[in-house]
Image (spheres, grey):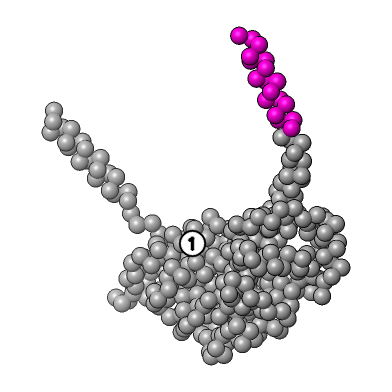
Amino acid sequence: MNIKHTLLFALTLLLFSACSEQPKLPILGPREAIEIKNPDGSTSTDTLYKTISAFSFLNQDSTLLTNDTFKDKIYIADFFFTSCSSICPTMHRHMKEIFDQYKDNDQVMFLSHTIDYKYDKPSVLKKYATKLGVDGKQWQFAYGSKDSIYKIAEKDYLVAVIEDSAEKENYVHQGWLVLIDKHKRLRGSYEGTDEKSVAQLKKDIAILLDEKEETK
Amino acid sequence: MRKPLLAITFLITIACVVYSCQNAGQLQQDVYYVNGRDLYIRHCQNCHGANGEGLALLAPPLTDTTSLKDNKSKIACFIKNGISDTTMIIAGKKYDGKMPDFNFANIDIAQLVVYITNTFGNKQGMYSPEQVAKDLKNCQ
């Protein structure tokens, strides 16, 4: 009788432990199937995920900012402008919290693109960063041509940005905070003005940092 | 047994009537405060914070009672016309950013100011739309 019980208990325990697999973040964006050649000459199918294309911007120190800056890092990207008084302050209030939490973690970076290509020159971005209390290289502020920034927003980070002179502040944009992994893939998109969504982002950063490197 | 109960009920009723008469002013202030809070959440909180803590050096806090008191007659102007090219020292820190203008009616400004000056540790009492009109005349 007792042995039977113990056995049952052990089995149940085994069943539960089998379920507690590490949570994994989805890979977002369109994908396509590609054929790859194996070392032994045979072919098999693999999935090609959407990645952030190569870019080249100036940062708040007027130095060049490219994909290489974010090599082997996970990073959180967003689109804003310094004179925005609607959603940007809330987005950056939340992003600053995360920045403070991961300060000096060399695996995590932040990238804020300005969509105000007319006014937000690197010196303006620098002033903004300083006032926000951001120093050093971990949080980069990107300045680029309208074409390059608006294109990367829409095509790669999947964030809508519009210049609209009918608007009081000239620009309309979405407040997504986009989580990018070490392979430049989109792993999450979070509403930067929403407390709950930002809490989820914080959890997901930890999950992404824990993710084991896939063997390729 | 019945009589004391009646007497007590009567006394409580009288007390309530007297209390509510005395607090008609307080009641109006409370209405302003609640409406002002709605306005604050919608228009001000993103920069100045849910607890009036401000946003680093981009937006000043509203928790500095002294600054708020000293500038009370200017707050209406700040809200109505915005702030630019002005440096302010608040709680020992320098703020020189811009604040957008909000084209509010006097009543809205009054309600907003009642909220701001009676929360976040402030306690400055009532502020009427008439006072707003007066203060707006003296905007620089």
By secondary structure, the bulk of the magenta-drawn segment is best described as helix
The reply, left or right, for residue A122 in relation to residue A215 is right
Q: Is residue A128 above or below residue B17?
A: below
Q: Which residue does the image show at 16% across and 36% down from the upper left?
A: A6
Farthest residue, direction top: B1
Decide which of B39, A4 is in the foreground and name it.
B39
x, y percent for residue B93:
59, 76
> Within the magenta stretch, is there residue B16?
yes
Residue lying at the far bottom in this picture: please name it.
A63
Q: Is residue B88 magenta?
A: no
Residue depicted at 64% across the width and 57% down the height = B122
Q: Which residue is mark 1?
A: A201
Q: Residues within 10 Å of mark 1 (few under 14, many from 20)?
A: many
Number of callouts: 1
Location of residue A151 in the rendering, given as x and y in whole percent from the top left corner:
63, 77
Which residue sits at x=35%, y=65%?
Answer: A210
| Quarter of the figure with residue B96 | bottom right
Q: Which residues are magenta?
A: B1-18
Quadrant (top left, top right, bottom left, bottom right) of the C terminus of chain B: bottom right
Front-lying residue, B16 or A34: B16
Whether residue A92 can be seen here: yes
State the image coordinates of residue A79 (x, y, percent, origin top left).
Answer: 61, 73
Placement of A62 over or under A28, stated as above or below = below
Q: Secondary structure at mark 1?
A: helix
Image spot of residue B51 (x, y percent): 59, 58
Callout 1, which amino acid? Leu
